[in-house]
Image (cartoon, rainbow, N blue to C red):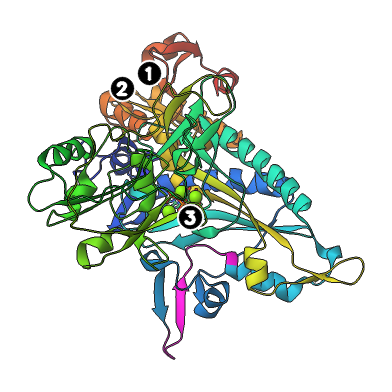
């Protein structure tokens, strides 16, 4: 591709609303353009990266024996009512009506749709196991779309769904997918870690996330310094230091309107000024462990959202129980109004409700009767920390180290949750009907492109790993206004590279070297060849890897260039 025909939309300015480096660089390099909150257009240069990620994912899924299909993004409500998730999904699911007033959603995920197809087509054990996947646009009306394509509302996901006659079959396919994910993340060039995960509202038992390690990551991971223990802090059922969950019989001890001191303590913790009529509800187990906390008052929820704490993976949102859990340690399992199936703390600000239930995420471990307005203070000793570095690792090997990660992929053993709810049954060898086991496996294709930039950039711009670079090499002739030789040599090399099947860019814009090099660095092309009269006089090109400090001279031949790529 010639840059004279491929308008780069690079800018020096840092966009004001871009908080993290990948978002800034993707905008500055002209890879993406914003259309609305959480809605992005992939410009030609960015789309080349996205397609590369997609192709690596597709290759490895095919190699692992999964079958590609494509399901509609708009899905009938009936399927979600059958699975029971129509009412559970909440505001993240975009609901739409057609002209006949029938309900639909724009798919945030596809468990229901695939289970529907499988119950129609698969009747016999002879047709199982099977693993279907697609690479499809999803829509999730994220509470706070941010970080560009990293947390968008419309995004590209690879989602796979497998069906099995028994739990052993599911466990084997889960391992197969785990291996495929390991290959995918390695090929993309990411520094990653697989960690134990919470299975959220998708349901099921075993689950792991694949995290790209980066300081901007919204998730906090607890990993052992010496052993294999690695978990998203959301997923640790017990505190990694081994502190047990509060006993189900623990008495409610404190429900508070905080004194000044407590307010300051929490303020400091959240790194947000809590002034005015803020109320703090603290429910504490008899053994002294903190098990529930909520804020209510006339503070702006936005202030809370904007708050940052070094130990909180994301700007703190009081509206998510997971965040509270992450912030205050794993003991916070549930805090919500009685009989409310989903604890949404934001509601507390609006409703004059009482009698919260509170407790650890355990059956029958809930405490009832927590209430506003009873006076007592958070004890000085209250443990407002969460998992702390240096805690002993639960596997007994080494201590806990905290890392930040960007969730790039997530694999689940769902079991029979959907197959049962949606009446999928298959005949076994004896002709008896069984309910198959199901697994599901997602990768955020569009998120991955951004996540890699978080790991791979410098002050001048992006540094693409070869595997997902939009172009592999850029050929830059300099001094072309003085003599035609460099221009001709560059044209010739460019043509030879194209003929050799190399994705090459030719910077034929005739700019001064500075701006051309700056663009090449910003858009992150891994290899650069500079051709000038001086080098040509010695039959040499100048070669520089994007990561190298200095350029080197190489023979002015195609073979010498290919040897570098
Ligand atoms: P998160 O915790 O970041 O909200 P999730 O757990 O809700 O992600 P999954 O349901 O596990 O996401 O979906 C599979 C993958 O889709 C995720 O691992 C992630 O890479 C990607 N993904 C999820 N939400 C978004 C989003 N809003 N924008 C871009 N990618 C996303
Ligand atoms: Mg999510
Ligand atoms: Mg997640
Ligand atoms: Mg997930």
Q: Is 435 in front, or is 468? A: 435
- Highlighted range, magenta: 98-111
Q: Mark 2 or mark 3, which is nearer the start of the sequence?
A: 3
**Residue contact between numbered discs 1 and 2, judged by CB atoms under 8 Å:** yes
Q: Could you tell me what secondary structure mostly forms the magenta stretch?
A: loop
Is residue 343 positioned above or below 197 on the image? below
Q: Residue at x 21, y 42 (%)?
A: 307
Q: Residue at x 47, y 63 (%)?
A: 108
Q: Residues within 10 Å of mark 2 (few under 14, many from 20)?
A: some
Disc 3 within 8 angstroms of ligand 1 (CB): yes
Q: Residue at x 47, y 29 (%)?
A: 241
**In the image, farthest residue toward the bottom:** 100
The location of residue 99, given as percent across then percent down, is: 41, 89
**In the image, farthest residue toward the right:** 430
Q: Which mark is residue 479?
A: 2
The location of residue 344, given as percent across then percent down, is: 33, 60
Q: Is residue 343 magenta?
A: no
Give the residue pinned by disc 3.
Answer: 156
């Amino acid at each position: 591709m010639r840059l004279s025909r491929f308008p780069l939309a690079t800018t020096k300015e840092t966009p004001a609303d871009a908080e993290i480096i990948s978002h800034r660089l993707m905008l500055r390099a002209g890879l993406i353009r914003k259309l609305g909150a959480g809605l992005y257009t992939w410009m030609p240069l960015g789309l080349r990266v996205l397609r590369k990620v997609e192709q690596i994912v597709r290759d490895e899924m095919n190699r692992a024996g999964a079958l590609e299909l494509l399901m509609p993004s708009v899905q009938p409500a009936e399927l979600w009512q059958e699975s029971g998730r129509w009412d559970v999904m909440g505001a993240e699911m975009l609901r739409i009506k057609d002209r006949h007033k029938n309900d639909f959603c724009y798919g945030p995920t596809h468990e229901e749709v695939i289970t529907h197809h499988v119950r129609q087509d698969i009747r016999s054990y002879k047709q199982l196991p099977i693993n279907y996947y697609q690479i499809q646009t999803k829509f999730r009306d994220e509470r706070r779309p941010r970080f560009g394509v990293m947390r968008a509302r419309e995004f590209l996901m690879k989602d796979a769904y497998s069906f099995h006659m028994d739990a052993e079959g599911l466990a084997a396919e889960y391992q197969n997918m785990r291996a495929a994910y390991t290959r995918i993340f390695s090929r993309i060039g990411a520094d990653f870690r697989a960690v134990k995960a919470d299975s959220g509202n998708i349901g099921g038992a075993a689950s792991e996330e694949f995290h790209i390690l980066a300081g901007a990551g919204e998730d906090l991971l607890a990993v052992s310094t010496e052993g294999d223990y690695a978990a998203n802090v959301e997923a640790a059922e017990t505190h990694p230091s081994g502190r047990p969950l509060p006993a189900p019989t623990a008495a409610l001890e404190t429900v508070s309107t905080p004194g000044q001191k407590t307010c300051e303590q929490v303020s400091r913790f959240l790194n947000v000024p809590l002034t005015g009529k803020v109320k703090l509800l603290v429910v504490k187990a008899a053994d002294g462990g903190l098990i529930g906390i909520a804020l209510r008052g006339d503070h702006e929820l936005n202030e809370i959202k904007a708050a940052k704490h070094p130990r909180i993976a994301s700007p703190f949102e009081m509206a998510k129980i997971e965040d509270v859990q992450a912030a205050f340690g794993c003991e916070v399992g549930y805090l919500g109004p009685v009989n409310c199936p989903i604890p949404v703390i934001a509601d507390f600000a609006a409703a004059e409700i009482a009698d919260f239930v509170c407790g650890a995420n355990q059956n029958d471990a809930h405490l009832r009767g927590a209430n506003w307005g009873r006076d007592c203070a958070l004890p000085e000793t209250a443990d407002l920390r969460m998992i702390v570095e240096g805690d002993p690792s639960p596997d007994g090997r080494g201590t806990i180290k905290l890392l930040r990660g960007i969730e790039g992929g997530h694999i689940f053993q769902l079991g029979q949750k959907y197959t049962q709810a949606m009446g999928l049954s298959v005949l076994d060898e004896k002709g008896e009907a069984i309910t198959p086991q199901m697994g599901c496996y997602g990768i955020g294709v569009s998120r991955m492109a951004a996540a890699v930039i978080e790991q791979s950039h410098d002050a001048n711009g992006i540094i693409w790993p070869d595997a997902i670079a939009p172009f592999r090499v850029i050929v830059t002739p300099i001094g072309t206004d003085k003599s035609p030789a460099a221009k001709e040599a560059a044209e010739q090399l460019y043509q030879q590279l194209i003929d050799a099947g190399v994705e090459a860019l030719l910077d034929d814009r005739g700019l001064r070297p500075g701006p051309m090099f700056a663009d090449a660095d910003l858009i992150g092309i891994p290899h650069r060849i500079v051709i000038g009269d001086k080098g040509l006089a010695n039959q040499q090109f100048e070669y520089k890897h994007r990561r190298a400090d200095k350029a080197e001279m190489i023979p002015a031949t195609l073979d010498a260039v290919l040897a570098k790529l």
